Image: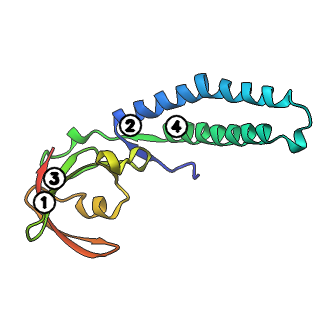
C-alpha cells in the first residue's frame, strides 16, 4: 500500500470503519487469543487443528485491523454538498435509466473502502461510477462496461 494513496469515503463510511475497528480490537481479538490459549492446552501443536485454525483466524483478524487503520489514516472525507447539486460526485446518490426503456436504477457512489453493491453503494472505481462521475442531471452518457457500451440518462442526483 503506497503511503500517498488516499481512500475517498463518506463520513458515514469512515464511522462504519471506526466501529468495525473498535469491534475487532475490543471484542474479536480477545476471543481469538482465548481460542489460541485453549488450543495450546491440548498439547502437541504440530497436529493440533484447533490451534492452526485459531492462528489462521488471528492472522486474518490482524490483517484486517492493519488494513482498516491504513484506510482511516489516509481517508479523504468527501463532502458531496461541496459540488453543484446536479453534478454526479462521490457521496451522491444517482438514479439513471438505461436507454431506450429499461427500469431506473439508483446507486450511491462511494469510495472503494465502503462499497457494498448489495445495498446500493458502488465504488467510484467501478465502470458505472467512472462513467457517471462529473456528469449532470438529464445528461445522456455512454458508459463502457465489460459487456459493452451502455447508454443511460441521469434522471436524479441527490
Residue at image point 28% right, 44% down: 91
Q: Is residue 4 left or right of residue 87?
A: right
Q: Nearer the viewer, residue 89 or 48?
A: 48
Residue at image point 67% right, 24% down: 30
Q: Nearer the viewer, residue 62 or 141?
A: 62
- The crowd level at tag 3 (other Cα within 10 Å; few <14, some 14-19, many 20+) is some
Numbered disc in front, either 2 or 4: 2
- The crowd level at tag 1 (other Cα within 10 Å; few <14, some 14-19, many 20+) is few
Q: Is residue 75 left or right of residue 33?
A: left
Residue 17: where, in percent of width, then height? 46, 34
Q: Which numbered circle lies on residue 73?
A: 4
Which callout, 2 or 1, points at the residue further toward the start of the chain? 2
- The crowd level at tag 2 (other Cα within 10 Å; few <14, some 14-19, many 20+) is some
Q: Which numbered circle lies on residue 155?
A: none
Q: CA distance from mark 3 to mark 1?
A: 10 Å
Q: Mark 2 = which residue?
A: 13
Numbered disc in front, either 2 or 1: 1
Which callout, 2 or 3, points at the residue further toward the start of the chain? 2
Give the image quarter of residue 158: top left
Residue at image point 24% right, 41% down: 80
Residue 147: where, in percent of width, then height? 31, 75
Give the image quarter of residue 52: top right
Q: Which numbered circle lies on residue 95?
A: 3
Amino acid at each position: 500500500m503506497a503511503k500517498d494513496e488516499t481512500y475517498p469515503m463518506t463520513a458515514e463510511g469512515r464511522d462504519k470503519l471506526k466501529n468495525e475497528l473498535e469491534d475487532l480490537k475490543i471484542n474479536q481479538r480477545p476471543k481469538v487469543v482465548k481460542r489460541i490459549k485453549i488450543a495450546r492446552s491440548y498439547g502437541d501443536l504440530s497436529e493440533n487443528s484447533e490451534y492452526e485454525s485459531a492462528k489462521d483466524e488471528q492472522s486474518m483478524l490482524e490483517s484486517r485491523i492493519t488494513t482498516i487503520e491504513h484506510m482511516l489514516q489516509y481517508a479523504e472525507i468527501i463532502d458531496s454538498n461541496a459540488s453543484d447539486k446536479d453534478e454526479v460526485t462521490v457521496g451522491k446518490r444517482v438514479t439513471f435509466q438505461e436507454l431506450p426503456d429499461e427500469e431506473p436504477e439508483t446507486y450511491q457512489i462511494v469510495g472503494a473502502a465502503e462499497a457494498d453493491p448489495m445495498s446500493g453503494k458502488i465504488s467510484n472505481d467501478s465502470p458505472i461510477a467512472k462513467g457517471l462521475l462529473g456528469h449532470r442531471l438529464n445528461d445522456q452518457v455512454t458508459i463502457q462496461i465489460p459487456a459493452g457500451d451502455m447508454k443511460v440518462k441521469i434522471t436524479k442526483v441527490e
